[in-house]
Each structure stands twice: as structure tokens, then as C-alpha cells.
Amino acid sequence: MIVAEGILKQFGSHQVLKGVSFQVEDGQIVALMGANGAGKSTLFDILATIDPDFEGSVAVADYDVRKNPREARSRIGYVPGRFSLYGDLTVAENLEFFAGAYGCRAGDIEALSPFLWRSIADFSGFRADTLSGGMKQKLAICCALVHNPSVLLLDEPTVGVDPVSRHDMWKEIGALRDKGVCVLVSTHYLDEATLSDKILFLDQGEILLFDSPADIVGSYSRRIFAFPCPSDELPQIEAALTAMPGVLEYYLWGDSLHITVDASFNAAPVCGHMPVAVSPGIEDIFIDTLSERRKRV
């Protein structure tokens, strides 16, 4: 379990985290989302006991990360956003090193991470720096799991990873949840976020949304319309939307435009294109939530 209460973190005069509070239960996956600079990696460093210089309190696996960092660390598996294994060691040697650091057996990884280890076992003799991006990330996760942690922290583990490897990683993450592991994983991929139990949406050091994907969508009250938008008509359409009553926001959505509207909006043709009501998705809600925040700040 992770329990964070009122985390404040400042670098010089810049407030990176502004009273962040949340809880991740055992056997639960929480997807951490937000733009670059939202404070995600800083939050991971605090949770992983790397950065004790913060205000507020954090308990991981029932251990205070400042008072009992060694005990907390023994229960945490952490994969940072940058590749942090030893490139001049082989896959097997990296695994042996991390197992030795925790006083456990490297051979246990076959049972602890069957889906990922199965896909890299044949590369045991390869140096880590010769692996592809996806294979490096699989190895990093295996090294983070070798001591059977109860809390797993994954900072953007699938960035630059091929679809098959992404599928393997999320299959493993789902299996870990079923075994009761508490997982906090940051991602920019909305399809991954919807596989989680909850989404924690962070922006400029503050939590904007924290709920299940279904409840985030279900509690959204605004209407959204879409209509075709050929690229050569975009300037005229944007000008028309700016003057149209009830239009709150508009943004490109593939080869269409999505518009967020209030109760005063009456659907009418825009440059010959008729808006069609669509069901809001997570991405629509994130864009709208961020837009509203930017207006207030």
C-alpha cells in the first residue's frame, strides 16, 4: 500500500508538488498521468526513498519512507524513467547483481515474472547495452521484481517500446495485481491508463482527477460534438467556432475537430459541416480539464 498525505516539494522558488495526497491499495493499479513537468518523476523519487527532502508524509508498505527508508526500500520495486541497469553486464549478471543486493535468488524470477522473463531468457548472455529498448525495459522490470516486492513503481516503462512488448508488460502488471501487489505506473498512453483501477491525473504539482476510468467518464457533464475538418478549411472553421455561442473549446481529433460546449450551444452547420454529438472519452476529459485549469491559473 502507498499512503501519501500533503506532499510538498520545492526546488528553489519553484513549487513542484503542491499538497499531493492519495492512496494506492494492495492489489490495485493506479496510472499516473500528466504532461512533462507535472511532477511525476519527482513524486516517484519521493516514494522510492531517493528524495527525503519534502514536506508531508509518505508510507510505503506501512513504512515511513523518511523514518524507515531501508525497510521501505526492501518492499519496493522501482523502474525509473531512464535506463539504470549496468550496460556492460549481461542480462543474467544484472539479475544476479540485484538479487544479491536483496539477499535473494536470481532463479526465482521465473516464478515472480513469468511473462517477461520468458521473453528475455534466451538473451541471458547478451550485454544489457546491446538490447533493444523493449528488452531493456523488460530486464529492468525483472530486476525490480527479483526480491518479490509488495509495491511496484514504474516510471513510463513503455515509452518507445513496441506494441508486443507493451502487451507483455501489461500482462505482467495485471498478474502482479492479481497477486496483491500495489502498482503505481506512469504512462502517456490512454489505452494503458484504461487498464488501471484508477487514474491519478497530475498537473503542475496538483491532482486534477483521481478516480476509476469509468467514474471519470461517468461524472463528466459537458457535451462534446465532432465534425469533419479538412486541413484546408481549418482556418475558416476555427474562425467560425470562435464566434459561435456555447463553444468552450475545440481541438483536432484525427481528421476531425472535437468541440466542448455548454448548455447555450445549438448544433448548426459550420462551414457546411454538421456537428455530431459524441460520447466523451478520457482524452477529451483530460484536454477539457487542463483547459479549465489554464483559464484559472
Image (tube, helix red, strand yellow):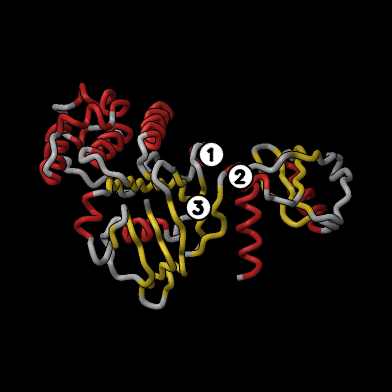
Q: What residue is rendered at 43% in x and 61% in y? A: 39
Q: What is the CA distance from the residue labelled 3 to the residue labelled 1?
A: 12 Å
Q: Which residue is mark 3?
A: 200
Quadrant where the image shows the C terminus: bottom right
Whether 16 is drawn above or below 256: the answer is below
Q: What residue is rendered at 86% in x and 56% in y? A: 264
Identify the mark nearer the N-term, 2 or 3: 3
Q: What residue is rendered at 14% in x and 40% in y? A: 99
Q: Is residue 32 visible?
A: yes
Residues at marks 2 and 3 touching, judged by CB atoms closer than 8 Å:
no
Using residue 5 as the reference point, say whether residue 59 is left or right of it. Answer: left
Q: Position of residue 140 (x, y in %)?
A: 26, 39
| Three-letter residue code for mark 3 | Leu
Foreground pick, 154 / 257: 154
| Three-letter residue code for mark 2 | Ile
Residue found at the far bottom of this picture: 13
Where disc 3 sits, the SS reads strand
Q: What residue is rendered at 57% in x and 43% in y? A: 213
Where disc 2 sits, the SS reads helix
Q: Residue 258 shows which numbered tag?
A: none
Where disc 1 sits, the SS reads loop
| Mark 3 neighbour density, 10 Å: few (under 14) some (14–19) many (20 or more) | many
Foreground pick, 140 / 70: 70
Q: Which residue is mark 1?
A: 194
Foreground pick, 152 / 279: 152
| Three-letter residue code for mark 1 | Thr
Q: Position of residue 68 (x, y in %)?
A: 23, 62
Residues at marks 2 and 1 touching, judged by CB atoms closer than 8 Å:
yes
Identify the mark nearer the N-term, 3 or 1: 1
Q: Residue 282 shows which numbered tag?
A: 2
Identify the mark nearer the N-term, 2 or 1: 1
